[in-house]
């Protein structure tokens, strides 16, 4: 195994710096918070009464909550829909035009879904090079997402009011604790649904040019136009902030009286009720007692050193892949960032469509993100109120399906359930597939904006970015074999991941399935990369002979060229950031 350890590194002494020979620059590059990608999209995630005055949200700054009047008037479908309807009809996209008109007339979830379904079908046949058409179709989806967010916010407000009523009735003993529990659950579920709808809206906004539109603020128009504002994208951020503030009510304190909480938790432990949709017993207990400063359990720290059990796992993986004809990534395809300029990177790797692992970028560029996210207790304390999508029971690498669900949850709830110090994450992932959970490809770095000050955009993106995603999960999380429609830099911050790479030429051997969406084309493989059914997929054996595998370690950045097939499995609890450019 000498060759493998020469590539994977040996950190027996516990000194993580040995894996990073590069030295930080005296003047690190600007933080990501100042990059145009983040500054120009900030209005989609924050809100301020004065358009154009949106600054990065910090823990010290008060949160500006949009008024009901602002939310009601700022969408302005009367002004936004007619031009889109006209454009759709001119492009012979009558189904989208009719769906938009119906949604403008009645802003229901059903009509919004009709717009999205019609738009997605159209994107499946529109050529990606028809940029203007794709942009207008995506704008239709954006407005539909906004309507869905508004209806979800309405439902959340109604559920909150019902909870407050139930609380008052409980104080006067005119209703039961069970009724209060039900109201609490319903308010929580409604708040998370509003968060999901608003985040989908903000993420959709990354694909759409949305020019400023003048709307009435407050429901009336003065003759001097003093009551009109140019909202820009403030209307998007307003919905995100409104939804996240509804979720934050469940983080730090609940609507339940403090003295009542302990009794209700005790009752819950002595008489466990059947789990309600979307929440299990541990979730409910956590919600009743959770606070920013008092998490239910001490949380683990993410690993940055390869321990002996992991080394044994890597040995076994290496032997298995080699026996199936795959190659270990060559030493020549791992370079130190100090010896790789952006020009050299482009000439030797991007232009040649060739993967490479770059070591030491985070240390050289002065990233402090590892210290922010490695200590999960710190992460939960600072950013625990962020609502995040949690994939639970993700299909595991051996092809065994657990019950796969994706539900929104507070970040602190997710961390408390899956990363407590009492648990053994790696062992649990091997023995109980329902203990695998993943916040994958998520906009956490937009939500928790203070994190933007702890990393920079790598120079190897050449200043251009189409998306930045965070990936936080337990051991055993899997991203199945697929391709991306953009160049990809995968930066491993904490933990270790197995990555398998295959060139674009193996599409037939991996039984490629193509899916269209938002004007992009993505390819997926149904093959279980580590446990392929050779009877069902006999050609995959030929793909493996062309494939490469590697272990991605902390402070390593993997360049995955556009069109390359890749499969990823977390060998330990892990945090990664990727840049599509």
Image (cartoon, helix red, strand yellow):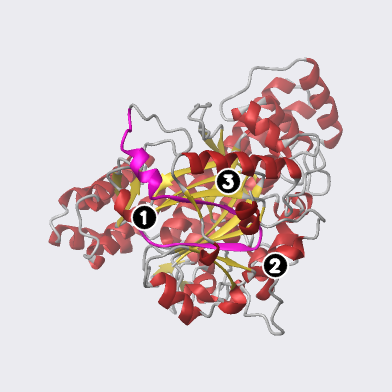
Q: Nearer the viewer, mark 3 or mark 2?
A: 2
Which residue occupies 70% across, 27% down? Answer: 180
- Inter-mark Cα distance, 1 to 3: 27 Å
Question: Residue at left 51%, top 31%?
Answer: 398
Q: Does dot 2 land on a helix, a strand or a loop?
A: loop
SS assignment at label 3: strand
Check disc 2: other Cα within 10 Å, few if <14, some if 14-19, many if 20+.
Answer: some
In the rendered image, residue 567, in percent from the top left (x then y), is placed at 47, 47
Q: In front: 291, or 480?
A: 480
- The stretch drawn in magenta includes residue 316: no
Q: CA distance from mark 1 to mark 2?
A: 28 Å
Pick the front one: 418 or 263: 418
Q: Which residue is mark 3?
A: 439
Magenta-span inclusion, residue 553 = yes
State which quarter of the image contains the C terminus: bottom left
Q: Is residue 98 left or right of residue 165?
A: left
Q: Which residue is mark 2?
A: 20
Q: Residue 522 vs residue 464: left or right?
A: left
Q: Residue furthest bottom?
A: 27
Residue 579 visible here: yes
CA gap between label 3 and label 2 equals 27 Å
Residue numbers of the magenta segment: 536-564
- The mark lying in front, picked from 1 and 3, is 1
Q: What label does residue 417 carry, if any?
A: none
How many C-alpha atoms fall within 10 Å of the one at disc 3: few (<14), some, or many (≥20)?
Answer: many
Mark carried by residue 503: 1
Q: Quadrant of residue 53?
A: bottom right
Q: How far across and how far down the image is residue 579, in percent? A: 50, 64
Pick out the residue farthest to the right.
259
Q: Nearer the viewer, residue 82 or 384?
A: 384
Taking the image as drawn, is residue 156 in sight?
A: no
Query: Which of the 4 image quadrants contains residue 360?
Result: bottom right
């Amino acid at each position: 195994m000498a060759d493998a350890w020469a590539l994977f590194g040996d950190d027996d002494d516990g000194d993580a710096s040995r894996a990073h020979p590069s030295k930080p620059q005296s003047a690190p590059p600007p933080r990501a918070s100042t990059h145009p990608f983040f500054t120009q999209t900030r209005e989609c995630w924050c809100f301020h009464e004065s358009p154009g005055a949106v600054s990065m949200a910090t823990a010290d700054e008060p949160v500006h909550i949009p008024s009901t009047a602002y939310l009601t008037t700022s969408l302005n479908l009367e002004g936004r829909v007619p031009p889109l309807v006209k454009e759709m009809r001119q492009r012979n996209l009558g189904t989208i035009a009719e769906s938009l008109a119906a949604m403008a007339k009645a802003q229901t979830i059903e009509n919004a879904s009709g717009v999205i379904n019609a738009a997605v079908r159209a994107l499946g046949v529109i050529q990606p090079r028809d940029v203007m058409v794709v942009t207008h179709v995506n704008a239709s989806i954006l407005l539909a997402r906004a309507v869905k967010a508004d209806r979800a916010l309405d439902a959340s407000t109604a559920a909150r009011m019902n909870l407050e009523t139930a609380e008052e009735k409980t104080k006067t003993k005119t209703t039961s604790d069970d009724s209060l529990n039900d109201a609490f659950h319903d308010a929580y579920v409604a708040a998370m649904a509003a968060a999901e709808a608003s985040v989908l809206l903000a993420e959709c906004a990354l694909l759409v040019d949305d020019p400023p539109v003048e709307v009435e603020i407050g429901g009336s128009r003065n003759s001097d136009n003093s009551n009109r504002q140019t909202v820009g994208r403030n209307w998007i951020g307003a919905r995100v902030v409104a939804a996240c503030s509804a979720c934050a009510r469940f983080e730090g304190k609940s609507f339940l009286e403090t003295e009542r909480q302990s009794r209700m938790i005790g009752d819950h432990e002595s008489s466990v009720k059947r789990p309600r949709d979307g929440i299990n017993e541990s979730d409910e207990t956590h919600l009743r007692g959770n606070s920013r400063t008092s998490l239910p359990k001490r949380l683990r720290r993410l690993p940055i050193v390869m321990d002996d059990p992991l080394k044994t796992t890597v040995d076994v993986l290496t032997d298995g892949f080699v026996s199936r004809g795959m190659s270990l990534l060559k030493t020549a395809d791992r370079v130190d960032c100090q010896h790789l300029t952006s020009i050299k990177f482009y000439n030797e790797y991007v232009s040649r469509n060739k993967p490479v692992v770059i070591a030491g970028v985070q240390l050289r560029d002065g990233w402090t993100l590892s210290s922010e996210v490695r200590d999960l207790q710190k992460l939960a304390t600072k950013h625990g109120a962020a609502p995040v999508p949690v994939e639970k029971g993700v299909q595991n690498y051996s092809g065994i399906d657990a019950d796969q669900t994706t539900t929104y949850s507070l970040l602190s709830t997710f961390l408390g359930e899956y990363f407590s110090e009492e648990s053994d994450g790696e062992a649990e992932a091997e023995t109980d597939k329902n203990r695998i959970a993943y916040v994958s490809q998520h906009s956490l770095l937009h939500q928790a904006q203070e994190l933007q000050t702890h990393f920079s955009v790598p120079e190897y993106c050449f200043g251009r970015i189409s998306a930045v995603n965070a990936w936080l999960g337990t051991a055993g999380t899997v991203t199945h074999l697929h391709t991306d429609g953009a160049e990809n830099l995968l930066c491993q911050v904490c933990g270790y991941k197995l990555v398998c790479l295959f060139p674009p030429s193996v599409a037939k051997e991996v039984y490629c399935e193509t899916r269209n969406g938002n004007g992009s084309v993505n390819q997926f493989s149904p093959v279980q990369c580590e446990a392929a059914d050779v009877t069902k997929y006999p050609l995959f054996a030929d793909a493996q002979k062309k494939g490469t595998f590697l272990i991605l370690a902390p402070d390593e950045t993997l360049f995955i060229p556009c069109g390359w097939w890749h499969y990823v499995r977390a060998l330990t609890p892990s945090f990664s950031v990727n840049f599509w450019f």
